[in-house]
Amino acid sequence: MTAEPLSGTSASASAGAGYREITDARGRVYRVGETDRQILGHSRKLMVYLPWVAMMAISVFEYAYGSAEDVLSAAHGWTQSNTFWILSVWVFFQAGVAFPAGWLREKGILTARGATMAGAVLSFAGFLSISHFHNVSAAVLGFGLLGGVGSGLVYATCINMVAKWFPERRGGKTGFVNGGFAYGAVPFIFIFNYAFDTSNYQAVLDLIGVYILVVVAVCAWFFKDPPQNWWPADVDPLKVEAGSKNAITLAKNPPASKQYRPKEAIRTGMLPLIWVLLVITAGVSIFGISFQVPFAKDVGFGPLVAASSAGVLSVVNGIGRGVVGWLSDLWGRKITLIFVITVLGLAQFGILWAGNSRNEVLFLVFAFVSGFGGGAFYPLFAALTPDYFGENYNATNYGLAYSGKLVSGLFGGGLGAMAIDSWGYDGAYILAGGLSLVAAAMAMLLRNPGQPRGRTSVPTPQPAGG
């Protein structure tokens, strides 16, 4: 397969602006000449580390909540169904806010800083609600709606902002930031399992709320999106040095042929396919997060194994996101995604086998594998979306793709609970594993809509110094 040469024309955008716009052979515009320091006042690396810290702060919402459910039920008089619906509503709004927030940002109504600041305040309110409200409806509104919107604003802003700042190698950076959303919860998983009871629950939850508010607000103060069409000044989008890291990455993951608006992205058929794949894989992942600890307890494993399996799942879930993000820069996003979804499916069968065998070591091993597969697909979808449809409308395009998690929350939690009631853990885990393998097969249909079938159009590699 040979690279298709790109020819470009350039024109100064405005006198003394310090940048110029160049156009490749497909008509895509790149804004070059401005460094990250000229725009931000510091290195764009800060737009990786600060979003990563903010993502770690909000991870307690999803990945540690299951470990707090028993105490919350006892303290407030809630049933297991009550606590489940509180989390389900949170998932709904956490995923659902991504698209409207992206639309507001791209219309200039909401800035990256403003969205994240609002997210910090709403997240704080979410934890105060499950700390002080005994009424389950108030907790649903507080933690589920306000907390869901707040954490969703933080999540969506962090993920698509880092993709905009690193258009030439977004896989590893997006995966690193996304990973914080999982392993950031580990300390809280153990706090909720060993130092959280009905005598101190309010103090613990209030302090967690303050922690989220302060950490996220400080990070948000520095957040800023790059200008539309921005491309790093030190990377020529039309000519890449042969053998360089950028050449490998761009060959495997060629840039979008143009900046697709949401309606255009939908018409390609690829955005709807990404949405369906995310529905299935996120549903299987949420099923694992929701029922792994209950399954461990059901088969007779002690609280240490149950908590450790959740901690292992969370840590590997996060680290796996960074690893596969980096791998996708080398292997290609599509191949890596198929690999990850397959691993996720096989892990469900492994957990079931280990649990039924009462083998604690194997259970932790498969919790490790499930954690890897159950989070690694998120940064792949987050990187694949701008790869296919460009960066300018990534906040809305990825918001549409990520809205699949709206359905996943019901599929992974509600339908998972129904499957367990009807067929037991055996039937539920077999169904989850089978659905994941179906999704892996469907992922083979993915293709960059702007590229000719079977061909890749990328900047022409040039010898060093040439």
Image: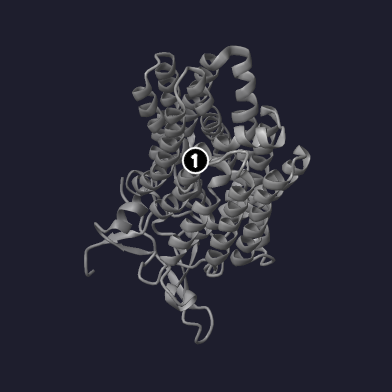
- List x then y, in percent, for residue 68: 58, 37
Answer above or below: position of 50 versus 445. Answer: below
Look at 54% across and 35% down and name the residue there. 277
Q: Quadrant of residue 109?
A: bottom right
- In the rendered image, the residue lying farthest to the front is 199
- The scheme the figure's colours follow is one colour
Numbered disc 1: secondary structure: helix
Q: Is residue 437 visible?
A: yes
Characterize the local packing of mark 1: few (<14), some (14-19) or many (20 or more) Cα atoms within 10 angstroms: many
Residue 217 horizontal side relative to residue 465, left or right: right
Q: Amino acid at mark 1?
A: Ile
- List x then y, in percent, for residue 378: 49, 43
Answer above or below: position of 316 versus 352. Answer: below
Of residues 144 and 449, the one drawn nearer to the viewer in this rendering: 144
Look at 40% across and 49% down and name the residue there. 253
- List x then y, in percent, for residue 219: 52, 64
- List x then y, in percent, for residue 301: 44, 22
Of residues 384 and 205, the one drawn nearer to the viewer in this rendering: 205
- In the picture, the quarter occupied by the N terminus is top left
- In the picture, the quarter occupied by the C terminus is bottom left
Answer above or below: position of 296 versus 184. Answer: above
Look at 39% across and 61% down and name the residue there. 6
Residue 252 horizontal side relative to residue 79, left or right: left
Q: How many marks?
A: 1
- In the rendered image, the residue lying farthest to the left is 464
Q: Is residue 390 visible?
A: no
Q: Quadrant of residue 334?
A: top left
Residue 301 horizontal side relative to residue 134, left or right: left
Of residues 459 and 339, the one drawn nearer to the viewer in this rendering: 339
**Which residue carries the number 1 mark?**
189
